[in-house]
Image (spheres, grey):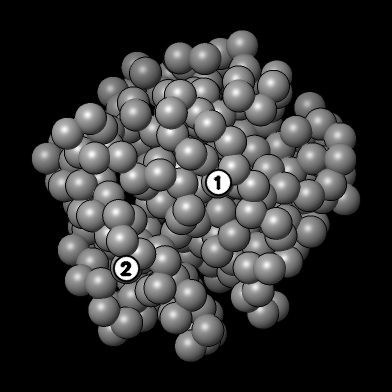
């Protein structure tokens, strides 16, 4: 599938003073997609393959998180780029859009953000899907270094994508160029540095386990069997901690189920939301 950002109209809404970008498609109950925290990530680049599939059943909305894509990247003097800043922003977006009982799908950093929304703004959320989700306190492994220490070169972007996708994934020049160009946009580049500095300072992107166990929403935990960033053991731990949780493990898949296996991933998520 070719990357063509013009497939979806970029829309903007003011969220507590932050000009926030999103794309949407379809009609029906709302499904909010939250991308991960890798360099160059945004709503379109992470979800372009899934948007048309989800749009058959939902009003699907994908947001550019704080400091990513075309959403504002506030001055670090007024924004600490913490996990709280991200989940407060997403909750504010849901309210600004006039939505209620949104099902959330979060990848990696987006998964941790979605959990924060579930716990701090319980009434806004219907169901939760965690896909290769951050949130557990694990070792910062060598696999994370291309993400944490991304150097804003195209070579660095290739290394990052190789870390996030499975060994057989075809990395196109188009994808490299698209994500790299997003990563070096003025303001966004600095925001990424501030975001990763916060993660390094905390020793990772995690909550206490008792916080994760507070999630009371019906939850689907999706993980690539070959994910180097969020190993399979972490998916099992999420299932142990979250009481009302189901698991879906995708073979031949790294950290990007929505890009590596969009049909499989979209079908599993749709089935989960519709059947529970």
Secondary-structure class at tag 1: strand
Check the image and name the residue furthest to the top: 123
Left or right of 128? Residue 109 is left
Q: Residue at x 35, y 64 (%)?
A: 185
Q: Residue at x 44, y 81 (%)?
A: 177
**Image position, residue 178 (x, y; %):** 48, 75
| Quadrant position of the C terminus in the picture | top right
Secondary-structure class at tag 2: loop
Q: Does the residue at mark 1 contact the one at mark 2 (Cβ under 8 Å)? A: no
Q: On the image, numbered disc 2 is attached to which residue? A: 184
Q: Tell me if residue 131 can be seen.
A: no
Foreground residue, 122 or 179?
179
Above or below, 142 relative to 217: below
Instruction: Tell me which numbered mark, 1 or 2, is placed earlier along the sequence.
Output: 1
Left or right of 6? Residue 250 is left
Mark 1, other Cα within 10 Å: few <14 / some 14–19 / many ≥20: many
**Image position, residue 125 (x, y; %):** 63, 21
**Image position, residue 260 (x, y; %):** 59, 69
Mark 2, other Cα within 10 Å: few <14 / some 14–19 / many ≥20: some
User: What distance separates the C-alpha of mark 1 from that of mark 2?
Assistant: 17 Å
Q: Residue at x 32, y 82 (%)?
A: 154
Above or below, 94 relative to 19: above
Q: On the image, numbered disc 1 is attached to which residue? A: 21
Foreground residue, 137 or 117?
117
């Amino acid at each position: 599938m070719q990357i063509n950002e013009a497939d979806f109209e970029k829309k903007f809404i003011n969220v507590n003073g932050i000009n926030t970008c999103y794309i949407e498609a379809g009609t029906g109950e709302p499904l909010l997609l939250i991308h991960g925290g890798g360099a160059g990530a945004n709503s379109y680049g992470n979800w372009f393959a899934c948007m048309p599939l989800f749009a058959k059943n939902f009003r699907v909305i994908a947001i550019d998180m704080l400091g990513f894509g075309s959403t504002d990247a506030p001055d670090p003097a007024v924004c600490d780029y913490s996990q709280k800043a991200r989940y407060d922003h997403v909750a504010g977006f849901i309210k600004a859009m006039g939505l209620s009982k949104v099902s959330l799908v979060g990848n990696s950093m987006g998964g941790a953000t979605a959990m924060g929304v579930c716990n701090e703004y319980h009434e806004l959320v219907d169901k939760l899907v965690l896909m290769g989700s951050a949130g557990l306190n694990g070792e910062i492994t060598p696999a994370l270094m291309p993400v944490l220490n991304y150097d804003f070169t195209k070579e660095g972007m290739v290394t990052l994508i190789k870390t996030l996708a499975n060994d057989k994934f075809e990395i196109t020049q188009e994808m490299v160029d698209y994500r790299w160009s997003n990563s070096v946009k003025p303001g966004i580049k600095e925001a990424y540095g501030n975001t990763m500095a916060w993660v390094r300072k905390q020793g990772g992107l995690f909550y206490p386990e008792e916080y994760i166990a507070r999630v009371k929403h019906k939850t689907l935990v999706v993980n690539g069997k070959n994910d180097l960033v969020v190993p399979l053991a972490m998916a099992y731990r999420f299932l142990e901690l979250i009481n009302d949780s189901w698991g879906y493990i995708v073979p031949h898949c790294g950290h990007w189920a929505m890009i590596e296996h969009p049909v499989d991933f979209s079908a599993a998520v749709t089935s989960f939301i519709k059947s529970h």
